[in-house]
Image (spheres, rainbow, N blue to C red):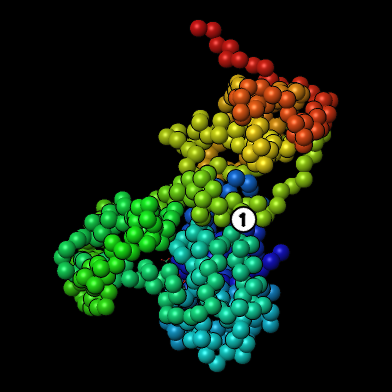
Amino acid sequence: MSRAAIVGGGVIGGGWAARFALMGWDVAVFDPSPDAREALDAVMARARRALPGLYDRALGDEGRVTLHDDMAQALQGAEWIQESAPEDLKLKQGLIARIEEHAAPSAIIASSTSGFRPSQLRDGARNPDRIVVAHPFNPVYLLPLVELVTEDGPFATRAAEILREIGMDPLHLTTEIDAHVADRLLESIWREALWLVRDGIATTEQIDRAITHGFGLRWAQMGLFETYRMAGGTGGMTDFLKQFAPALAWPWSRLTDVPEMDDALATRIGALSDAQAGGRTVAELEETRDDNLVGILRALRHADWGVGKHLKEHENSRGAPPIDWSRPIVTADRVVPLDWTDFNGHMTESRYLLAFADATERLMEFIGCDDAYIAAGRSFFTAETHIRHVSEIHAGHRFRIETQALQSEGAKLHVFQRMLEGDRLLATGEHFLLHVSLETRRPAPPTGALASGMARLAEGHRGLPYPEGAGRAVGQRP
Ligand SMILES: NC(=O)C1=CN([C@@H]2O[C@H](COP(=O)(O)OP(=O)(O)OC[C@H]3O[C@@H](n4cnc5c(N)ncnc54)[C@H](O)[C@@H]3O)[C@@H](O)[C@H]2O)C=CC1
Ligand SMILES: C[N+](C)(C)CC(=O)CC(=O)[O-]
């Protein structure tokens, strides 16, 4: 079992702990604060609620998370050490010096610092090469981006591998700069926003709306440059620059100045922000944020785009169990995502069809009807579906689908699927699919690998008992 240590278990350290643990790593957290246990448990609970549902496959066993008040004990056996103490250079340098004393020689020492450069953190270090910046984004357990700031070399390669293993997307920067890249961008907009409040031009709510109802939506799926390329019309970036370059000389920004955060400004921002929160606690806001992020990330996953593509690639890199063709095939093993529940607090009706349809697609892939086969002009269309809802399931709960072929011959694929939580039957789905030519949109015989895949499935399932509940219709008399 791989092992990580986290030094400082607050908002960010807790997020790292949760991500490592949910990806199967044992995690030891060192934090001297008496409140550390409560804070860590709260982040773990939030992460357990949100992260597993991003994936269409179960993440597997969670690692063990332990909390320590002795640093040496926490660092024992750790291959990754994430320093996540408050943003104070002297404190971080002192901690890193202590970490170096106890860490295994091959361990990577990463800092979550939002703005310090690796050379500042390495000051006086014995083995500076292994000290890197790994700057994440809050909530660390949901957002994949991490700025990895360090020179090329074996530690950088290993660090990027580990970050990818836990589902992060390392943006490797070999040139160091205060506040790295992403925080530079954030800081510029943050400083501009502070001016707008200070000068009485906009409230905190208005500024946030300017982001969330407009360009914030764009930025989740395409960045600044790709977005502006389209803003240039068919002439692309060249035309965009022609039109908007003169504006750079106009007073459209106050970035060269920084407003002084005096008591009056701090109090005003505090009051506006309180009014904007409308009485919702930070924990309530965090829950809403996580629900929304899961929805957005899953939408991008469905579109196979940007960060959604990254999620899928991470899922695929984790491998899949081998298929036993002599039994009903496990075509889904996953948890109910947050956005699959309804006003009754359980998985909503339409998602059963989605889950069964996804499972059928997995079966199609297993037997040879994969992307390449479909691109060549043949596929399956579903002709009939019957779903029985047997018992309920809630968000975050793990379920699997077992798919049995009742017929797999010629153009006909007739399957019966059982959805289970452990041994408890949740639902059954029966589906009749026809293999078609995508050119004529009419039934056609399967070819090549799919023809043999269907035969293999038919052969494997021939001797299985006819499943209870198959062939049923809605039997209620009018
Ligand atoms: N909060 C944010 O949005 C982000 C913060 N960061 C960076 O992450 C780091 C941590 O920030 P947060 O988690 O927000 O702070 P935080 O205040 O929530 O957590 C810091 C934790 O460090 C602990 N701590 C204090 N002194 C310590 C010591 N000597 N040894 C071990 N633990 C100690 C505290 O008890 C606390 O639990 C900072 O460098 C920050 O710049 C990075 C990305 C985003
Ligand atoms: C405000 N901040 C500098 C701590 C922000 C970050 O470092 C990244 C984030 O999560 O916004």
Q: In the image, 17: left or right of 63?
A: left
Residue at image position (20%, 71%) is: 251
User: The residue tagged with tag 1: helix, strand or loop?
Assistant: helix
Q: State which quarter of the image contains the N terminus.
A: bottom right
Q: Where is residue 57 in the image (x, y as percent from the top left)?
A: 63, 46
Q: Which of 38 and 163 is in front in this view?
A: 163
Instruction: Name, please, the residue furthest toward the left.
Output: 200
Instruction: Name, please, the residue furthest toward the bottom.
Output: 124
Vertical relation: 175 (above or below) 346:
below
Q: Which of 38 and 155 is in front in this view?
A: 155
Q: Where is residue 97 in the image (x, y as percent from the top left)?
A: 56, 87
Q: Nearer the viewer, residue 226 or 314?
A: 226
Q: What residue type is labelled 1?
A: His
Q: Where is residue 40 in the image (x, y as percent from the top left)?
A: 51, 64
The picture quadrant where one finds residue 265 is bottom left
Q: In the image, 261: left or right of 462?
A: left
Q: Where is residue 371 in the image (x, y as percent from the top left)?
A: 65, 41
Vertical relation: 361 (above or below) 185:
above
Q: Which of 461 and 438 is in front in this view?
A: 438
Residue labelled with disc 1: 314
Vertical relation: 302 (above or below) 471:
below
Asked whether the viewer can see residue 281, the reply is no
Ligand 2 found in image quarter: bottom left
How many other residues sit within 10 Å of disc 1, few (<14), some (14-19) or many (≥20)?
some
